Image (tube, grey):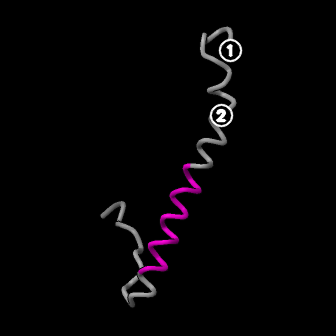
């Protein structure tokens, strides 16, 4: 953009890049869950955010 003096490419790629990162993390979680199920381990439920 002209006002911020930042290339328009960064704004154009921000949403697809963020989406790809989310999909990448989702695939990692699904892979971990399937491995846990195959090895008869308890599936990871996440850590507690607040006490």
Asked whether, in this view, residue 46 is left or right of residue 51, the answer is: right
- In what element is the residue under mark 2? helix
The residue that appears at 30% across and 64% down in the rendered structure is: 51
- Ranked by sequence position, the earlier of labels 2 and 1 is 1
Which stretch appears magenta? 21-35
Q: Residue furthest left?
A: 51
| Residue, disc 1 | 1
Picture coordinates of residue 37, whole percent (x, y): 45, 86
Picture coordinates of residue 10, whole percent (x, y): 62, 26
Closest to the observer, 50 or 22:
22
| Callout 1 crowding tier (Cα within 10 Å): few <14, some 14–19, many ≥20 | few
Magenta stretch encompasses residue 43: no
Picture coordinates of residue 40, whole percent (x, y): 39, 90
The residue that appears at 49% across and 79% down in the rendered structure is: 34
Residue 9 is drawn in which quadrant?
Answer: top right
Magenta stretch encompasses residue 30: yes
| Residue, disc 2 | 13
């Amino acid at each position: 953009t002209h006002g911020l003096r930042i290339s328009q490419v960064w704004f154009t790629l921000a949403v697809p890049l963020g989406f790809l990162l989310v999909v990448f993390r989702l695939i990692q979680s699904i892979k971990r869950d399937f491995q846990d199920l195959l090895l008869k381990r308890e599936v990871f439920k996440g850590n507690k955010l607040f006490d």
